[in-house]
Amino acid sequence: MGAWLRNAKPYLLLLAVQFGSAVMFIFAMDAINKGMSHYVFIVYRNAIAAVTLAPFAFFLERKVRPKMTPRVFSEIMALAFFELEHMKIKEVACQAKLIGTAITFGGTLLMALYKGPVVSVVRSSINHATQPQNVDDPTGNRWIIGTCFLLIGCAGFSSFYILQAITLRKYPAEMSLATWVCFIGALQSFVVAFFAERHHSHAWSLGWDTRLFAPAYAGIVTSGVQYYIQGKVIKTMGPVIVTAFNPLRMIIVTALACIILSEQLFLGSIIGAIVVVSGLYLVVWGKSKEYKARNEMPPSPTKENSLQHQQQLPVTAPRNEISDNKTQLVFHAEEQCYNCGPN
Protein backbone atom coordinates (compact mmCIF):
# COMPACT_ATOMS: atom_id res chain seq x y z
CA MET A 1 0.00 0.00 0.00
CA GLY A 2 2.81 2.38 0.84
CA ALA A 3 4.63 1.72 -2.44
CA TRP A 4 1.42 2.15 -4.44
CA LEU A 5 0.63 5.42 -2.70
CA ARG A 6 4.17 6.68 -3.27
CA ASN A 7 3.98 5.88 -6.99
CA ALA A 8 0.50 7.35 -7.35
CA LYS A 9 1.28 10.50 -5.38
CA PRO A 10 2.23 12.69 -8.41
CA TYR A 11 -0.94 11.71 -10.27
CA LEU A 12 -3.16 12.32 -7.23
CA LEU A 13 -1.56 15.73 -6.72
CA LEU A 14 -2.17 16.66 -10.36
CA LEU A 15 -5.77 15.49 -10.06
CA ALA A 16 -6.22 17.68 -6.96
CA VAL A 17 -4.68 20.61 -8.85
CA GLN A 18 -7.18 20.25 -11.69
CA PHE A 19 -10.09 20.01 -9.27
CA GLY A 20 -8.92 23.14 -7.45
CA SER A 21 -8.59 24.99 -10.75
CA ALA A 22 -12.08 23.91 -11.79
CA VAL A 23 -13.56 25.26 -8.56
CA MET A 24 -11.71 28.52 -9.18
CA PHE A 25 -13.39 28.86 -12.59
CA ILE A 26 -16.81 28.51 -10.98
CA PHE A 27 -16.04 31.23 -8.41
CA ALA A 28 -14.48 33.47 -11.05
CA MET A 29 -17.51 33.09 -13.31
CA ASP A 30 -19.81 34.18 -10.50
CA ALA A 31 -17.57 37.13 -9.58
CA ILE A 32 -17.38 38.35 -13.19
CA ASN A 33 -21.15 38.00 -13.55
CA LYS A 34 -21.48 40.32 -10.53
CA GLY A 35 -19.50 43.01 -12.33
CA MET A 36 -15.87 42.28 -11.45
CA SER A 37 -13.38 43.04 -14.22
CA HIS A 38 -11.42 40.03 -15.40
CA TYR A 39 -8.33 42.23 -15.73
CA VAL A 40 -8.58 43.26 -12.09
CA PHE A 41 -9.28 39.67 -11.08
CA ILE A 42 -5.93 38.55 -12.49
CA VAL A 43 -4.10 41.38 -10.69
CA TYR A 44 -5.61 40.50 -7.31
CA ARG A 45 -5.04 36.81 -7.92
CA ASN A 46 -1.31 37.14 -8.58
CA ALA A 47 -0.79 39.74 -5.87
CA ILE A 48 -2.49 37.61 -3.20
CA ALA A 49 -0.49 34.57 -4.29
CA ALA A 50 2.81 36.45 -4.09
CA VAL A 51 2.05 37.89 -0.64
CA THR A 52 0.93 34.49 0.66
CA LEU A 53 3.90 32.50 -0.64
CA ALA A 54 6.65 35.01 0.11
CA PRO A 55 7.00 34.32 3.88
CA PHE A 56 6.99 30.53 3.41
CA ALA A 57 9.51 30.73 0.58
CA PHE A 58 11.79 33.04 2.55
CA PHE A 59 11.98 30.90 5.69
CA LEU A 60 11.56 27.35 4.35
CA GLU A 61 13.92 27.63 1.37
CA ARG A 62 16.56 30.01 2.65
CA LYS A 63 19.14 27.20 2.88
CA VAL A 64 18.44 25.65 -0.52
CA ARG A 65 17.51 28.74 -2.53
CA PRO A 66 20.28 29.66 -5.01
CA LYS A 67 21.19 33.19 -5.92
CA MET A 68 18.84 34.92 -8.33
CA THR A 69 21.05 35.67 -11.33
CA PRO A 70 20.01 37.94 -14.20
CA ARG A 71 19.90 34.92 -16.50
CA VAL A 72 17.48 33.00 -14.28
CA PHE A 73 15.41 36.15 -13.80
CA SER A 74 15.13 36.61 -17.56
CA GLU A 75 14.04 32.99 -17.97
CA ILE A 76 11.22 33.57 -15.50
CA MET A 77 9.93 36.48 -17.59
CA ALA A 78 10.57 35.01 -21.05
CA LEU A 79 9.80 31.78 -22.86
CA ALA A 80 12.31 29.19 -23.97
CA PHE A 81 11.98 25.84 -25.66
CA PHE A 82 14.46 23.01 -25.17
CA GLU A 83 14.42 19.27 -25.47
CA LEU A 84 12.88 18.01 -22.25
CA GLU A 85 11.30 14.70 -23.28
CA HIS A 86 13.36 11.87 -24.70
CA MET A 87 11.25 10.46 -27.51
CA LYS A 88 12.07 6.93 -28.61
CA ILE A 89 9.46 6.16 -31.22
CA LYS A 90 10.19 2.42 -31.30
CA GLU A 91 9.35 1.98 -27.62
CA VAL A 92 5.78 1.13 -26.64
CA ALA A 93 5.74 3.65 -23.79
CA CYS A 94 6.64 6.50 -26.12
CA GLN A 95 4.03 5.42 -28.66
CA ALA A 96 1.41 5.35 -25.90
CA LYS A 97 2.33 8.90 -24.86
CA LEU A 98 2.09 10.22 -28.42
CA ILE A 99 -1.20 8.46 -29.20
CA GLY A 100 -2.66 9.42 -25.83
CA THR A 101 -1.73 13.06 -26.31
CA ALA A 102 -3.39 13.13 -29.72
CA ILE A 103 -6.53 11.45 -28.37
CA THR A 104 -6.70 13.86 -25.43
CA PHE A 105 -6.36 16.85 -27.73
CA GLY A 106 -9.09 15.47 -29.99
CA GLY A 107 -11.41 14.95 -27.04
CA THR A 108 -10.83 18.51 -25.87
CA LEU A 109 -11.71 19.88 -29.30
CA LEU A 110 -14.79 17.66 -29.39
CA MET A 111 -16.01 19.07 -26.07
CA ALA A 112 -15.42 22.62 -27.24
CA LEU A 113 -16.66 22.49 -30.84
CA TYR A 114 -19.48 19.94 -30.78
CA LYS A 115 -22.57 20.29 -28.61
CA GLY A 116 -25.24 17.92 -29.84
CA PRO A 117 -28.54 17.36 -28.05
CA VAL A 118 -29.10 18.39 -24.45
CA VAL A 119 -28.75 15.62 -21.87
CA SER A 120 -30.94 16.01 -18.79
CA VAL A 121 -28.91 14.73 -15.85
CA VAL A 122 -29.67 17.13 -12.99
CA ARG A 123 -33.08 18.67 -12.60
CA SER A 124 -32.64 22.42 -12.51
CA SER A 125 -34.83 25.10 -11.02
CA ILE A 126 -34.08 27.27 -14.06
CA ASN A 127 -36.52 26.78 -16.89
CA HIS A 128 -34.36 26.31 -19.95
CA ALA A 129 -37.39 25.81 -22.13
CA THR A 130 -38.06 29.53 -22.01
CA GLN A 131 -34.52 30.29 -23.14
CA PRO A 132 -33.47 30.20 -26.81
CA GLN A 133 -32.01 26.86 -27.80
CA ASN A 134 -30.67 27.90 -31.18
CA VAL A 135 -26.92 27.47 -31.14
CA ASP A 136 -26.53 29.39 -34.38
CA ASP A 137 -27.70 32.74 -32.97
CA PRO A 138 -25.10 35.56 -32.80
CA THR A 139 -24.82 35.25 -29.03
CA GLY A 140 -24.28 31.49 -29.18
CA ASN A 141 -21.54 31.82 -31.75
CA ARG A 142 -19.35 33.53 -29.18
CA TRP A 143 -18.39 30.09 -27.86
CA ILE A 144 -16.36 29.60 -31.06
CA ILE A 145 -14.32 32.71 -30.26
CA GLY A 146 -13.98 31.47 -26.71
CA THR A 147 -12.68 28.15 -27.98
CA CYS A 148 -9.98 29.91 -29.98
CA PHE A 149 -8.91 31.84 -26.90
CA LEU A 150 -8.85 28.60 -24.92
CA LEU A 151 -6.53 27.03 -27.48
CA ILE A 152 -4.22 30.04 -27.25
CA GLY A 153 -4.32 29.74 -23.47
CA CYS A 154 -3.43 26.04 -23.64
CA ALA A 155 -0.44 26.84 -25.83
CA GLY A 156 0.64 29.52 -23.38
CA PHE A 157 0.33 27.18 -20.40
CA SER A 158 2.31 24.49 -22.23
CA SER A 159 5.08 27.01 -22.84
CA PHE A 160 4.92 27.98 -19.18
CA TYR A 161 5.37 24.36 -18.06
CA ILE A 162 8.37 23.94 -20.33
CA LEU A 163 9.90 27.16 -19.07
CA GLN A 164 9.23 26.12 -15.47
CA ALA A 165 11.06 22.83 -16.02
CA ILE A 166 14.03 24.64 -17.53
CA THR A 167 14.21 27.20 -14.74
CA LEU A 168 13.97 24.59 -11.98
CA ARG A 169 17.20 23.04 -13.24
CA LYS A 170 19.10 26.22 -12.42
CA TYR A 171 16.87 27.49 -9.61
CA PRO A 172 15.69 24.37 -7.69
CA ALA A 173 13.45 26.19 -5.21
CA GLU A 174 9.84 25.54 -6.18
CA MET A 175 8.17 27.83 -3.66
CA SER A 176 10.52 30.74 -4.31
CA LEU A 177 10.05 30.34 -8.05
CA ALA A 178 6.27 30.34 -7.62
CA THR A 179 6.56 33.54 -5.57
CA TRP A 180 8.60 35.25 -8.28
CA VAL A 181 6.17 34.11 -10.99
CA CYS A 182 3.17 35.48 -9.10
CA PHE A 183 4.94 38.74 -8.26
CA ILE A 184 5.99 39.40 -11.85
CA GLY A 185 2.56 38.32 -13.05
CA ALA A 186 0.97 40.85 -10.71
CA LEU A 187 3.14 43.64 -12.11
CA GLN A 188 2.45 42.70 -15.72
CA SER A 189 -1.29 42.28 -15.21
CA PHE A 190 -1.46 45.56 -13.27
CA VAL A 191 -0.07 47.45 -16.26
CA VAL A 192 -2.65 45.84 -18.56
CA ALA A 193 -5.52 46.40 -16.13
CA PHE A 194 -4.50 50.00 -15.51
CA PHE A 195 -4.89 50.91 -19.18
CA ALA A 196 -7.90 48.65 -19.77
CA GLU A 197 -9.88 50.01 -16.80
CA ARG A 198 -8.52 53.56 -16.68
CA HIS A 199 -12.02 54.99 -17.17
CA HIS A 200 -13.65 52.63 -14.66
CA SER A 201 -12.18 53.26 -11.23
CA HIS A 202 -14.99 51.28 -9.60
CA ALA A 203 -13.64 48.13 -11.27
CA TRP A 204 -11.00 47.85 -8.53
CA SER A 205 -13.55 47.74 -5.72
CA LEU A 206 -14.23 44.49 -3.86
CA GLY A 207 -17.27 43.25 -1.98
CA TRP A 208 -18.03 40.74 0.75
CA ASP A 209 -18.98 38.07 -1.74
CA THR A 210 -17.29 36.12 -4.52
CA ARG A 211 -15.67 39.34 -5.73
CA LEU A 212 -13.38 38.98 -2.70
CA PHE A 213 -13.44 35.23 -2.20
CA ALA A 214 -12.75 34.34 -5.84
CA PRO A 215 -9.41 36.21 -6.21
CA ALA A 216 -8.36 35.12 -2.71
CA TYR A 217 -9.06 31.47 -3.50
CA ALA A 218 -7.45 31.77 -6.93
CA GLY A 219 -4.35 33.42 -5.50
CA ILE A 220 -3.78 31.02 -2.60
CA VAL A 221 -4.91 27.72 -4.11
CA THR A 222 -4.75 28.02 -7.89
CA SER A 223 -1.70 30.23 -8.33
CA GLY A 224 0.25 29.63 -5.12
CA VAL A 225 -0.22 25.97 -4.23
CA GLN A 226 -0.73 24.89 -7.84
CA TYR A 227 2.55 26.36 -9.09
CA TYR A 228 4.40 24.77 -6.18
CA ILE A 229 2.90 21.31 -6.77
CA GLN A 230 3.51 21.53 -10.50
CA GLY A 231 7.13 22.43 -9.85
CA LYS A 232 7.59 19.39 -7.62
CA VAL A 233 6.02 17.05 -10.20
CA ILE A 234 7.90 18.61 -13.12
CA LYS A 235 11.24 18.05 -11.36
CA THR A 236 10.57 14.31 -11.11
CA MET A 237 8.38 13.48 -14.12
CA GLY A 238 8.76 16.32 -16.61
CA PRO A 239 6.28 18.86 -18.01
CA VAL A 240 4.45 16.49 -20.39
CA ILE A 241 2.52 14.67 -17.68
CA VAL A 242 1.47 17.98 -16.12
CA THR A 243 0.14 19.25 -19.44
CA ALA A 244 -1.67 15.97 -20.11
CA PHE A 245 -3.82 16.43 -17.01
CA ASN A 246 -5.12 19.85 -18.06
CA PRO A 247 -8.09 18.54 -20.12
CA LEU A 248 -9.50 17.03 -16.93
CA ARG A 249 -10.15 20.59 -15.80
CA MET A 250 -12.68 21.04 -18.59
CA ILE A 251 -14.51 17.88 -17.55
CA ILE A 252 -14.66 18.94 -13.90
CA VAL A 253 -15.78 22.45 -14.81
CA THR A 254 -18.55 21.04 -17.00
CA ALA A 255 -19.78 18.78 -14.21
CA LEU A 256 -19.66 21.52 -11.55
CA ALA A 257 -21.35 24.05 -13.83
CA CYS A 258 -24.12 21.55 -14.50
CA ILE A 259 -24.65 20.84 -10.79
CA ILE A 260 -24.00 24.22 -9.16
CA LEU A 261 -24.86 26.74 -11.87
CA SER A 262 -27.60 24.60 -13.44
CA GLU A 263 -26.09 24.88 -16.90
CA GLN A 264 -27.09 22.59 -19.72
CA LEU A 265 -25.12 19.42 -20.40
CA PHE A 266 -24.67 18.46 -24.04
CA LEU A 267 -23.95 15.08 -25.55
CA GLY A 268 -20.75 16.36 -27.12
CA SER A 269 -19.35 17.15 -23.67
CA ILE A 270 -19.99 13.59 -22.49
CA ILE A 271 -18.42 12.00 -25.56
CA GLY A 272 -15.47 14.37 -25.41
CA ALA A 273 -14.96 13.61 -21.73
CA ILE A 274 -14.79 9.88 -22.43
CA VAL A 275 -12.26 10.47 -25.20
CA VAL A 276 -10.16 12.74 -22.95
CA VAL A 277 -10.05 10.19 -20.14
CA SER A 278 -9.07 7.43 -22.59
CA GLY A 279 -6.22 9.50 -23.99
CA LEU A 280 -5.07 10.53 -20.53
CA TYR A 281 -4.97 6.89 -19.47
CA LEU A 282 -2.61 6.11 -22.35
CA VAL A 283 -0.36 9.03 -21.45
CA VAL A 284 -0.21 8.05 -17.77
CA TRP A 285 0.39 4.40 -18.65
CA GLY A 286 3.23 5.26 -21.02
CA LYS A 287 4.78 7.70 -18.58
CA SER A 288 4.60 5.22 -15.70
CA LYS A 289 6.27 2.52 -17.81
CA GLU A 290 8.98 4.95 -18.83
CA TYR A 291 9.49 6.14 -15.25
CA LYS A 292 9.66 2.57 -13.95
CA ALA A 293 12.15 1.52 -16.63
CA ARG A 294 14.33 4.53 -15.87
CA ASN A 295 14.45 3.72 -12.16
CA GLU A 296 15.21 0.04 -12.78
CA MET A 297 17.88 0.75 -15.39
CA PRO A 298 21.28 -0.62 -14.25
CA PRO A 299 24.39 1.55 -14.41
CA SER A 300 25.95 1.89 -17.82
CA PRO A 301 28.77 -0.65 -18.51
CA THR A 302 30.95 2.04 -20.02
CA LYS A 303 30.70 4.11 -16.88
CA GLU A 304 31.54 1.11 -14.69
CA ASN A 305 34.54 0.23 -16.83
CA SER A 306 35.78 3.81 -16.78
CA LEU A 307 35.44 3.94 -12.99
CA GLN A 308 37.26 0.63 -12.57
CA HIS A 309 39.95 1.77 -14.97
CA GLN A 310 40.42 4.97 -13.01
CA GLN A 311 40.68 3.01 -9.79
CA GLN A 312 43.29 0.69 -11.29
CA LEU A 313 45.46 3.47 -12.67
CA PRO A 314 48.64 3.94 -10.58
CA VAL A 315 48.00 7.60 -9.98
CA THR A 316 49.45 7.81 -6.47
CA ALA A 317 52.04 5.05 -6.73
CA PRO A 318 54.81 7.07 -8.39
CA ARG A 319 54.36 9.87 -5.90
CA ASN A 320 54.66 7.46 -3.00
CA GLU A 321 57.73 5.87 -4.54
CA ILE A 322 59.35 9.28 -5.08
CA SER A 323 58.58 10.37 -1.55
CA ASP A 324 59.96 7.07 -0.19
CA ASN A 325 63.17 7.50 -2.23
CA LYS A 326 63.56 11.06 -0.98
CA THR A 327 63.12 9.89 2.59
CA GLN A 328 65.71 7.14 2.14
CA LEU A 329 68.20 9.64 0.65
CA VAL A 330 67.72 12.02 3.57
CA PHE A 331 68.28 9.24 6.11
CA HIS A 332 71.34 8.01 4.20
CA ALA A 333 72.84 11.54 4.09
CA GLU A 334 72.25 12.04 7.80
CA GLU A 335 73.87 8.70 8.54
CA GLN A 336 76.96 9.63 6.52
CA CYS A 337 77.23 13.00 8.27
CA TYR A 338 76.99 11.26 11.62
CA ASN A 339 79.73 8.78 10.70
CA CYS A 340 82.00 11.51 9.34
CA GLY A 341 81.67 13.69 12.41
CA PRO A 342 84.26 13.94 15.24
CA ASN A 343 84.59 10.88 17.45
Image (tube, rainbow, N blue to C red):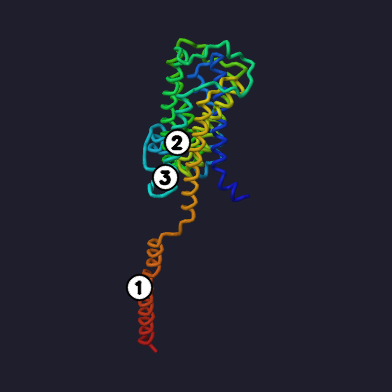
Query: Is there a contact, CB below 8 Å, between mark 2 and mark 1?
Result: no
Q: Is residue 107 left or right of residue 13?
A: left
The mark nearer the N terminus, 3 or 1, is 3
Up/down of 151 relative to 92, above or below: above
Identify which residue is drawn at 50% across, 11% down.
Answer: 201
Which numbered mark, 2 or 1, is in the foreground of this view?
2
Q: Is residue 302 visible?
A: yes
Q: Quadrant of residue 145?
A: top left
Label number found at residue 103: 2
Query: Is there a contact, CB below 8 Å, between mark 3 and mark 1?
Result: no
Q: Quadrant of residue 225?
A: top right
Give neighbour class at mark 1: few <14, some 14-19, many 20+ (Cα, 10 Å): few
Identify which residue is drawn at 56% across, 20% down.
Answer: 264
Instruction: Give the position of the C terminus as an image quadrant.
Output: bottom left
Up/down of 308 relative to 161, above or below: below
Task: Look at mark 1 in the image and give the residue it sits on.
Answer: 318
Type of amino acid under label 1:
Pro
Gap between marks 3 and 1 measured at Cα: 55 Å
Query: How many numbered marks appear?
Result: 3
Give neighbour class at mark 3: few <14, some 14-19, many 20+ (Cα, 10 Å): some
Element under disc 2: helix
Residue 336 rendering spot, x and y as whole percentages: 36, 85
Type of amino acid under label 3:
Gln
Residue 101 rendering spot, x and y as whole percentages: 44, 38
The mark nearer the N terminus, 2 or 3, is 3
Identify which residue is drawn at 53% across, 16% down.
Answer: 36
Gap between marks 2 and 1 measured at Cα: 65 Å
Task: Look at mark 3 in the image and give the residue it sits on.
Answer: 95
